Image (cartoon, rainbow, N blue to C red):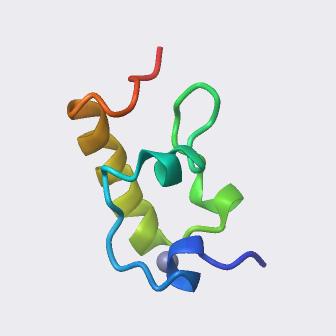
Amino acid sequence: MKQCFFCSQDTKDVDYKDTELIRRFLTFQAKIVSAKRSGTCLKHQRRLSRAVKHSRFMAFLPYQP
Ligand SMILES: [Zn+2]
């Protein structure tokens, strides 16, 4: 079983400005990779999705087509 990336990095919150990191958890269609596939725990998956929304709102990330 894969470990949660954010837990392993001791990351408490996901920085919406860190698009390089966030992009690693997006598919080529700019969708968030499911927690099952990325190994992200539910807590961090929620924070990741919030960061993605925030990042899109600030236009750091593209909206999905
Ligand atoms: Zn985690």
Name the side, left or right, on which 41 lies relative to 50: right
Tell me the residue at 43%/45% (across/down).
19
Residue farthest along the top direction in this orientation? 65
30 lies left or right of 56: right
User: Which residue: 59% across, 47% down?
Assistant: 33
x and y, in percent, of residue 55 in the image = 29, 40
Total labels drawn: 0
Q: Residue at x 51, y 54 (%)?
A: 21
Residue furthest right in the image: 1
Q: Is residue 43 above or below residue 24?
A: below
Residue 43 in the figure: left or right of residue 41: left
**Horizontal and vertical percent for residue 41?**
52, 73
Relative vertical location of residue 3 with respect to residue 36 in this rendering, above or below: below
Q: Percent from the top left, x then y, of residue 34?
A: 59, 51
40 vs 26: above or below: below
What residue is drawn where x is 64% and y is 29%?
Answer: 28
**Relative vertical location of residue 11 with respect to residue 47 in this rendering, above or below:** below
Viewer-proximal residue, 39 or 23?
A: 23
Q: Nearer the viewer, residue 24 or 35?
A: 24
The quadrant in which the N terminus is found is bottom right
Residue 5, given in percent of the width and then of the height, sits at 59, 72
- Picture quarter containing residue 3? bottom right
Nearer to us in this view, 58 or 26: 58
